[in-house]
Image: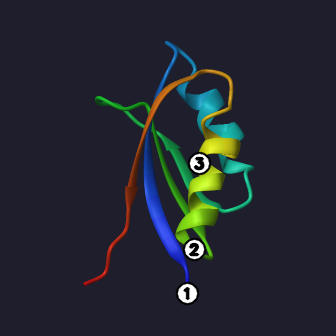
Amino acid sequence: MVVQAYILIQTDVGKAAEVASAIAQVKGVTLAEDVTGPYDVIVRAEARNVDELGKLVVSKVQNLEGITRTLTCPVVHI
């Protein structure tokens, strides 16, 4: 089973492209795009389970320089 999520990211001013590029290199990230709107970067990530997804977000994504806030939206199939 694969658990997926979208991560909405706010960055320091002018850092969106740099952050998206850095996040795209993280294992488990399948998509990273800098965008316009209330968030600066949208990321799609996947892991084998919810615990691994949480560790990915906390240790690999949130620690990147230039990120000021994240919101993780797990994908749910009903």
Which is more N-terminal, label 3 or label 1?
1
- List the residue tagged with mark 3: 57
Amino acid at dot 3: Val
Q: What residue appears at the point 60 percent right and 38 percent down from the top-left corner? A: 20
Q: Circle 1 sits in a helix, a strand or a loop, which is it? A: loop
Q: What residue appears at the point 32 percent right and 73 percent down from the top-left corner? A: 76
Front-lying residue, 77 or 39: 77
**Distance from the alpha carbon under mark 3 to that under mark 2:** 13 Å
Q: Circle 2 sits in a helix, a strand or a loop, which is it? A: loop
Query: Which numbered tag is attached to residue 45?
Result: none
Which is more N-terminal, label 2 or label 3?
2
Front-lying residue, 77 or 33: 77
**Residue lying at the far front of the rendered structure:** 51
Front-lying residue, 67 or 21: 67
**Residue lying at the far left of the rendered structure:** 78
Q: Position of residue 3 (x, y in %)?
A: 51, 73
Q: What residue appears at the point 53 percent right and 27 percent down from the top-left corner? A: 16
**Structural crowding at the residue carrying mark 2, measured as other residues with C-alpha within 10 Å and reported as few (<14), some (14–19) or many (≥20):** few
**Residue lying at the far top of the rendered structure:** 13
- Contact check, label 2 and label 1, Cβ < 8 Å: yes
For residue 73, which quarter of the picture? bottom left
Query: Which numbered tag is attached to residue 1?
Result: 1
Query: Which numbered tag is attached to residue 49?
Result: 2
Amino acid at dot 2: Asn
Q: Quadrant of the N terminus?
A: bottom right
Q: Quadrant of the C terminus?
A: bottom left
Amino acid at dot 1: Met
Which is more N-terminal, label 1 or label 2?
1
